[in-house]
Image (spheres, rainbow, N blue to C red):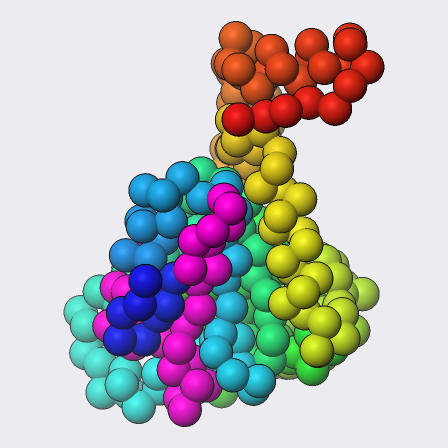
Amino acid sequence: MSWNTVTLDVADGVANLTVDRPDALNAMNTETLGEIESAIAEATEQEARVLVLTGAGDDAFIAGADIDYMKEFSTPEALAYAERGQGVVRDLRGFPGVTIAAINGYAFGGGCEFALACDLRVASERAVIGQTEIDLGIIPGWGGTQLLQRLVSDELARRLIFFGDRLDATDAHEHGLIGEVVAHDDLYDHVDEMAAELAAKPRHALYAAKEALNAYHETGGEGAMTVERRAWSGLFGTPDQREGMTAFVEKRDPEFE
């Protein structure tokens, strides 16, 4: 499926969502945000177990928000835009499956925030990532001040936001911002293999694991433990749980739905 600025391909439980504005380094405007929301909803409707987010071309994942588009925003317009961007972040975090950011180039500002909102991040060796808003006279507005601190130290999060520093893929990986760095030409093949492996996992258990992991950051402490406890116990009686445990006892590979 395709929209004006976004394409979506769903096959074998994997949805590949590509922001397709290469001439603008895949920068975000209201149209693109709305189309990403629609694409995520479509991937959910088609029961994809994995969603891969990337950008078209060889230069950028998502280079941020479209600065020319938003430079004259009033405060109410900026607030509405922040709410729209945060809505996409919520959609990515709430997607009922695993989300992977395939970072093929620049991931600045809102692009960095969308990568942070994904469950896993794999970067090309050419990738550069950062919350660069400070030099525009603003701060991250789509979740960066919250999401960044979940992956790196408080000190580093403050430095990245205060200075607007950019990290290359190797440094980002060393600091825990990115899970893997691969050769540029191997990025999509590697992510395809990851996605296929994840798509073969039991659907309900994947989503329960994601829900419990997210709860640690969202509620913390005993509240997160409660979410984990309920998610864990709720899997008992599902076909995947029955098959997984039966296969283990019978010493064979499970065959999940």
Q: Position of residue 8 (x, y in %)?
A: 39, 62
Towards the viewer: 110 or 247: 247
* Residue 103 shown left or right of residue 135 in the figure: right
Instruction: Tell whether position 225 is magenta.
Output: no
Q: Position of residue 246 (x, y in %)?
A: 69, 10
What is the total number of numbered labels drawn onto the structure image? 0
* Residue 61 shown left or right of residue 32 in the figure: right
Q: Which residues are magenta?
A: 9-37
Give the answer, above or below, for where 23 lies relative to 126: below
Q: Position of residue 90 (x, y in %)?
A: 39, 49
> Looking at the rendering, in which quadrant would you find the N terminus?
bottom left
Q: Residue at x 22, y 65 (%)?
A: 80
Q: Position of residue 183 (x, y in %)?
A: 76, 75
Q: Is residue 38 visible?
A: yes
Q: Locate residue 192: give its quadrant.
A: bottom right
Towards the viewer: 243 or 90: 243
Q: Residue at x 22, y 81 (%)?
A: 73
Q: Is residue 208 visible?
A: no
Q: Locate residue 162: give its quadrant.
A: bottom right
Give the answer, above or below, for where 178 lies relative to 5: above
* Residue 146 shown left or right of residue 182 in the figure: left
Give the answer, above or below, for where 44 lies relative to 37: above
Q: Residue at x 51, y 68 (%)?
A: 54
Instruction: Tell whether position 19 is magenta.
Output: yes
Q: Residue at x 31, y 67 (%)?
A: 2
Towards the viewer: 145 or 254: 254
